[in-house]
Amino acid sequence: MDYKKLADLLFPDNKFTVEEIEKKYPKRKLEKNAYVTRFAPSPTGYMHLGGFFQALIDYNLAKRSGGVFYLRIEDTDQKREIAGASAIILNILTSYGFLPDEYQLKGGVTVGDYGPYYQSERKEIYKAYAKKLVSEGKAFPCFCRKTEGLSDVKEKREKKFAVGINEDKDPCRNLTLEQIETNLKEGKTFAIRLKSKGDGVRKIKFHDGAKGEVEILENSMDAVLLKNDMMPTYNFAHPVDDTLMGTNVVVRGEEWLPSYPLHAEIFEALGFEQPKYIHSPLIYKLNEQGNKNKISKRKHPEADMRYFDKEGYDKQAVVEYLMNLINSNFENWRRVNPDADIMEFPFDGFKITANTPIFDFVKLNDVSKEIISHYSAEKCYEELLLWARENSLENVDYLVKDKDYVTKVLNIDREKPKPRKDIYKWSMFFDVFDYMFSAPAKFEVEEENKKDFEEVLKTYKKYIDLSSKEKWFENIKKMAAELGYATDNSDFKKNPEKYKGNVAKVCEYIRVAVTGRKNSPDLYEIMILLGEKQVLERLAQFA
Ligand code: GLU
């Protein structure tokens, strides 16, 4: 077969040759150990938590090594294109401080010399490489039914299990030049398939940054490279783009691991060197029965990164929590280095936690509480307002007008050696501190204590003194003694039957009357902020 002639027949009007293209994509000038990584999402219109997890690995690898982290939008599957996809991804990455070095906004700016960064704009590039492969007898046209890419690959794979490996070889690989010419004259469209050399028995080995040594059956499938609309499949775009754009470590989801042999064969056919791979684990969640489920947008709202913004999670907390899922020694490091910049952590993208990462809100909330507890009241106010501006407009006016009061509320039990850890996301603020904004409607008091509760509150009006914390507590103790409560705890422990309770119980009743709750931050601070008038109003209903 005259492959050169075949290539010209199939691609008569290619705009570029591969030589011309390669001139436009010179090797990147970087230090020897610098990593070039990319985040390469399909434009689904949101950013998946698992994708963010990968981008975090990408960013860390590139930035710590003086390399490049870029964003490429894989939009060759036009049916799934969502307008503004790259803006959504960029917004999220940037808001977490991970602005890629290179990216493109559709219809807007392009930053970087290795674009276009939208695959749909690289069609001529894929066509040039497909033509090259055909001219070397390594790929062939296929005129069969569904040649629309991955669905076809899937269909083939199913067949392989049903009827044996030879089915991998596509019947169109045996067409003669004359038959192909006839098909073309009849106006039939074609896809381009790889002419696989694999026998489906040999095995290949490679090192994966997350999985270690992997041994896997080599490819034997005549996989589709270009679909009949001349758009590449992922399998073809990956070797072409990552080579031209200079990626030297590919971080991608572990669902791509089974396709590795196919990619290895395509890299070889193209004469390209393969990058390193890190097949990052998918993130799971435990259900109520304790079974693991892949995190998915359908079942888990947190699969969409915008969830964390809506809820007002602290961004650093989200990042630190995920860092710990990537490298399990992060938590210990943070304990020893509470104030260190995250970039000082000895990150290792090639030592990803061997355990399946399980997303756990309890853990995330703890990380977040810890971080927020160390913020100043001023910083909390700014974060709260920022969150409200995006997610809770009805509260913005109030927050702006009463900045001083809100900051004071945020400062209760804060900026102290042992700050209170009650807030882990900003959407909680008005719930946690509801009693600072309106009188409680419900009171945490047991039925059998109601009488004592009311008695204390009736009496307390006479004893209230907010002039100093000492005076305030002294008076509570005086009242407690008068009503038959112990003021000395050791005495109370020895002779509990002598008393109605101890002074702590009296404080609890006052706390419940003022805040509705048995647990709250410092009661004196709360009463000072509310002011005596308001406290008395709250007590009045028990008179
Ligand atoms: N577009 C592919 C995906 O979203 C990218 C995989 C890769 O990073 O190579 O799964």
Image: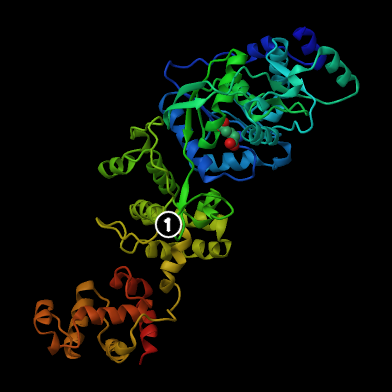
Closer-to-camera residue (424/287) = 287
The answer to whether 526 is drawn above or below residue 322 in the figure is below
Q: Is residue 13 visible?
A: no
Q: Position of residue 335 (x, y in %)?
A: 27, 45
| Quadrant of res 232 | top right
Q: Position of residue 506 (x, y in %)?
A: 24, 82
**Residue 417 vs residue 412: left or right?**
left
Closer-to-camera residue (504/305) = 305
The answer to whether 446 is drawn above or below residue 167 in the figure is below
The answer to whether 472 is drawn above or below residue 500 in the figure is above
| Quadrant of res 382 | bottom left
The answer to whether 482 is drawn above or below residue 416 in the figure is below
For the N terminus, the image quarter is top right
Residue at horizontal 73 percent and vertical 15 percent from the top: 131
Colouring method of the image = rainbow
Kind of residue at disc 1: Gly
Q: Position of residue 114 (x, y in %)?
A: 61, 22
Q: Which image quadrant shows ligand 1? A: top right
Residue under pointer 1: 290
Q: Is residue 347 visible?
A: yes
Closer-to-camera residue (247/172) = 172
Q: Position of residue 330 (x, y in %)?
A: 33, 40
Closer-to-camera residue (339/229) = 229
